[in-house]
Image (cartoon, rainbow, N blue to C red):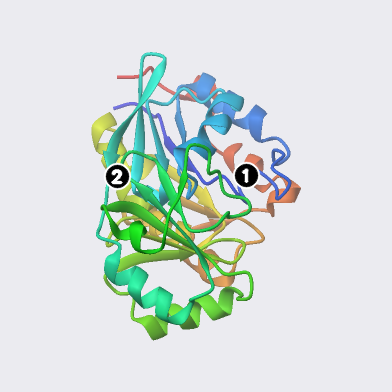
Amino acid sequence: MTERWLIGLDVDGTIILQDETMSPGVPEAISRLREAGHVVTIATGRSWMATRRYVEELGIDAEYVVCSNGAVTMRRVGDEWERWNVETFDPTPALALLRDRLPEARYMVELASGQRLFTEQLDDWTLDGGRRVTFEELSDAPVSRIVVVSPDHDEEDFHRLVADAGLNEVSYAIGWTAWLDIAPQGVDKGTALERVRGELGMAGERVFVAGDGRNDIGMFGWARSLGGRAVGMGQAPAEVKDAATEITDAVEDGGLARALDTLPAPAQVSAAE
């Protein structure tokens, strides 16, 4: 049995700051861990289209990358990437509930192919190759996610909305700015990482995850259940910190790099199986 760790890292508020620059020390820490033989990957709410740049910037050479809050897992095949596992659901019931309560909101769905359909332009979302459609067309095919952006509502409004709408047939998360991201029932970053762990044959007690958002709570629970480490960022909401096994500094203070530096040094890691 090797001493390699499977390391799954959130992007926004963990690897990067709000201006999308790197948190202090992160590139160096990830490079050290890769050289040590650990498996470092990303587990993010972002789509693959918005994730790939960080895989390349950080020199991440892992075979698998988790996107779209666990609904999409990408696999490296030579110099290319394939959509290795994609979870989908029928968006019709959720969209109907949401439209009744947020008729002026902007909506987007992501198809199994990765294409995005949207009702109006969404700031801060990558829509390259996407297609503007009517609201009704959003339900034409199964989707891997629904995104709802309503500039007039804040995070607490979204929490009340979810409770009022009874969105219990899908999983949801609220981003670090106010949008609602809905995934297939029972799917989160942790379920995707468990599939990756199984493929790689890595020990459960040597999983390390880090994040700062409510969409990281499932991933934290997964790591805890295996006896691994779940690191909450210093600026995370209280409920996210409560789900973690440990807390590091805030993202702007280099919290991720500090936590990563506690993992074994190269000389302590056995050769890969």
Rendered residue at 60%/61% (across/down): 176
Element class at badge 1: helix
Give above or below for 151 relative to 44: below
- Please state if 229 lies on the left or on the right of 77 as rendered: right
Question: Which residue ends up furthest to the bottom in the rendered image?
Answer: 164
User: x, y percentage for residue 99?
Assistant: 42, 75
Give above or below for 201 relative to 234: above
Q: Please tell me how crowded label 2 is: few (under 14), some (14-19), or many (20+) other residues with Cα within 10 Å.
A: some
Q: Are marks 1 and 2 in contact (CB under 8 Å)?
A: no
- Please state if 198 lies on the left or on the right of 175 as rendered: left
Rendered residue at 33%/70% (across/down): 94
Residue 227 visible? The answer is: no
Rendered residue at 34%/26% (across/down): 2
Q: Please tell me how crowded label 1 is: few (under 14), some (14-19), or many (20+) other residues with Cα within 10 Å.
A: many
User: x, y percentage for residue 120?
Assistant: 54, 58
Rendered residue at 69%/38% (across/down): 22
The residue type indicated by label 1 comes to Leu
In the picture, the quarter occupied by the N terminus is top left
Question: Which residue ends up furthest to the top in the rendered image?
Answer: 78
Work out how far the residue at label 1 is from the one at label 2, CA to CA, in angstroms.
Answer: 22 Å
Element class at badge 2: helix
The residue type indicated by label 2 comes to Glu
User: x, y percentage for residue 72?
Assistant: 35, 43
- Residue on which the image places disc 1: 256
Which label belongs to residue 194?
Answer: 2
